[in-house]
Amino acid sequence: MDKIPKTSIKDWAEDDKPREKLLNKGPAALSNAELIAILIGSGNNEESAVALSKRIMNEVNDNFAELARLTISDLQKYKGIGEAKAITIAAALELGRRRGTSVLNEKPQVKDSKTAFILFQKELGDLNYENFCVLLLNRANKVLKIVRISDGGITGTVVDQRKVFKVALDNNATSIILGHNHPSGQLTPSAADIDLTKKMKAAGETLDLPVLDHIIVGDGNYYSFADEGIM
């Protein structure tokens, strides 16, 4: 049986071309799969770029956050996705993540734990390993910046308290919020999480640099030490 020849976007009927659809109707009119199809340009011997992209997105529940968790090697397991295409997809997803965090330039005000969670989620939500960050605030509780303090493994990360407060003092922060992720999605703090939070809170009081909260991020949800009365 003859194989169906591989076709690029250039060979498609006018109504099936996502590039032309984007030009005529704007990027918001395209499906997630059509956007990915523009990135990869062509499919394989059995699938068009859109069909291949639909299959990939279907297997990650049409969710870009889940797609971002795939490694270059994971993406290359799909027939028609070589290293160059996999790198293009990864780069596009990283650009999207950075665009999301660029809102920090507008200095949003942190009024509650949910606001802090949204900021940490953009930084930590797609990671498959634990990472610890600190949110630096000014006197009006407006964000100065988010700083990654340490990377860890799947089950934990080591935090240098001196580094946290040095970063805060160097950036003239007047208060901070701690944040880290649990790749497992389990939000319940460990004994180590609780111990660290208590030590950081005590150190902050000594330095007159209050630790307002500690947020644990996992699977699109969060745990707030302040909300739970542990701070």
Image: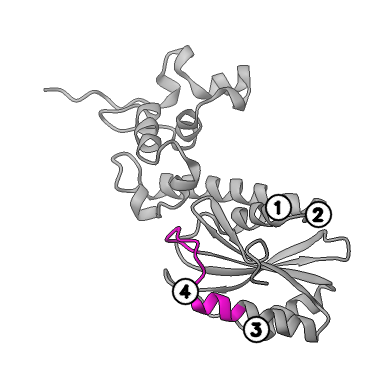
Who's the residue at 49% across and 46% down the image?
A: 65
The image shows residue 98, relative to residue 56, as above or below, that is below
| Dot 2 and dot 1 residues touching (CB under 8 Å) | yes
Mark nearer the N terminus (1 vs 4): 1
**Residue 109 image label:** 2
**Mark 3: few, some, or many residues within 10 Å (few <14, many ≥20)?**
few
Dot 1: what SS? helix
Mark nearer the N terminus (2 vs 1): 2
Q: Is residue 123 left or right of residue 116?
A: left
| Dot 2 and dot 4 residues touching (CB under 8 Å) | no
**Residue 199 image label:** 3
Mark nearer the N terminus (4 vs 3): 4
Q: Main secondary structure of the magenta part?
A: loop
In this rendering, the label closer to the viewer, 3 or 2: 3
**Mark 1: few, some, or many residues within 10 Å (few <14, many ≥20)?**
few
| Dot 1 and dot 4 residues touching (CB under 8 Å) | no
Start and end of the magenta stretch? 182-196
**Amino acid under disc 3:** Lys
Residue that numbered label 4 is attached to: 156
